Image (cartoon, helix red, strand yellow):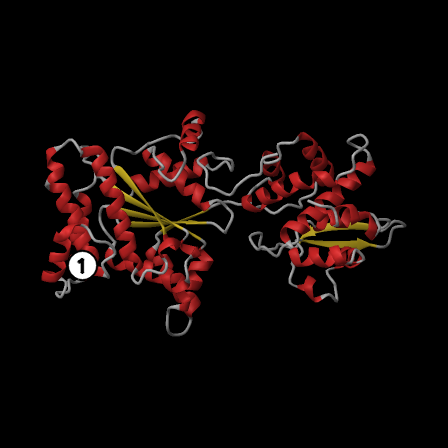
Amino acid sequence: MPLHNDEPTLIDQLNRVTLVEEVGEAVATCEPPQVFGIHGDWGLGKTSFLHQLQWYLTGECPQQTQDELTEAETTKVIPKGQHQDHVTVVWFEAWRYQHEQVPVVALLQEIRSQLAWYVTLGQQAKKMFEVTTRSALLSLEDLTKKIGIQASKIQEVGDKWERDHLATALPSHTIREHLQEAIGNLLPRSEKKKARLVVLIDDLDRCEAESAYKLLEGLKIYLTLRNCVFVLGLNQKIIEDAIRKNMPGERQDLRAAAYLEKLCQNFWRLPLVADPKALLYQWLPDDIIKEWITAAIGKSQCLPPNPRRLKGLANLLQRFIVRLPKKVGAKNDPAMIQQAKYTLIVAYVYQFHHDLFLRWESNPELYHHIRDWVRTYETKLKFLEHLELPYKIETDESTPTPQYKISSAYPDPTESNIFWIQPLLHELGDEVKPEDFLRYLRGKP
């Protein structure tokens, strides 16, 4: 069975087409300069969202394979090229340039390189390309040198310009004016709409703190241009931490938040997965596995609401199928449901809580401690204390058979230390023995 990769996609599996359209319209119709933010924790699909946004705006996405482009055009889930007449998109992966001395220089070089490709593609037969366009491209290169170090060498005229002029510093507002003019000369002309460059910056939150801060500073100082819109894909908390580390003085948390708010006028937040079980099923091609997982989960809310984590769990479950008993009863057979719960519980721990799995695998008796912990929130085991349980389980001892009431503990659903599988462990009866898990703990995935 094929395993799923974690590559970004143009296929909307998370029902975000409405959000793509909303952000796309804002980007295409706002009054530049603007900086927008797309917030999402790791694994929520920020890169895919930005790819889909580029597809919506221009009908292009060079970062994707031809097969992916063909499928996106065939399915037509996300409208294609709604603003290609006046929007040009440049893609910038921030983390690839995080060790540059001046990150904004790398960004400008990427803008220059990608704009040159677009212009060459569209104007290579026009005579004016030799004059106006070449001049604009050289201007971008020249201004890049003024801002920081020379990031690339193009033609000998660049070297001559550097010798003649680099010693003379230009004020930032003058650089902005020249950048705006140079970029404007490279954008398509539209009679009805004002042409704009949209720069999609991905993986800013994967950069080292100093590099992320330097790039934001470069945007603020040099790239607040009347023909540019920037869209930042980031985890807001991580970027605020990066800003705070580079800001002197007191009350850094408030100052870091205010800094980002001033730079980034609008934020959209990618929603968590509303139905993790349904999304997991999309990545389980085998009907037998689906039957087992359906039997195990029932009505429980026991899966992380994160697409990347669910895809990883789906891959593991496809491998875990070899651990299932060869013969099972009917779908509603209690014995089958019990075995299904064992499978999913062990697979979940294996995938998301490696340190716990190693201890449990080496000593199956640990099951008793885990079961008591998920029911009472109390444990003497230090390695369980860093995990957070998502539900409170209250026991009513007044009846002949103790009754349980489950209520939310309101955890932060984006944190990786949430032990989402708690309800299934609680549902297992007291007659379950540690050795019942051996088939799944010590099998070969």
x, y percent for residue 285: 62, 32
| Callout 1 secondary element | helix
User: To which residue does mark 1 refer?
Assistant: 173
Q: Which residue is more in the foreground, 429 or 156? A: 156
**Residue under the point 15% across and 54% down:** 158
**Residue under the point 74% across and 63% down:** 378
**Residue under the point 61% across and 38% down:** 280
Q: Mark 1 is on which residue type?
A: His
Q: Look at the picture and state if 59 lies above or below 196.
A: above
Outermost bottom residue: 249
x, y percent for residue 300: 70, 43
Q: Which residue is more in the foreground, 209 or 265? A: 209
How busy is the neighbourhood of tag 1: few (under 14 within 10 Å), some, or many (20 plus)? few
- Is residue 322 visible in the rendered structure shown here? yes
Q: Is residue 200 left or right of residue 179?
A: right
x, y percent for residue 438: 79, 49
Q: Is residue 124 left or right of residue 217?
A: left
Is the C terminus in the top left, top right, bottom left or bottom right quadrant? top right
Is the N terminus in the top left, top right, bottom left or bottom right quadrant? top right
Residue 258 sits in quarter: bottom left
* Figure label count: 1
Residue 220 sits in quarter: bottom left
Residue 146 sits in quarter: bottom left
Outermost front residue: 156
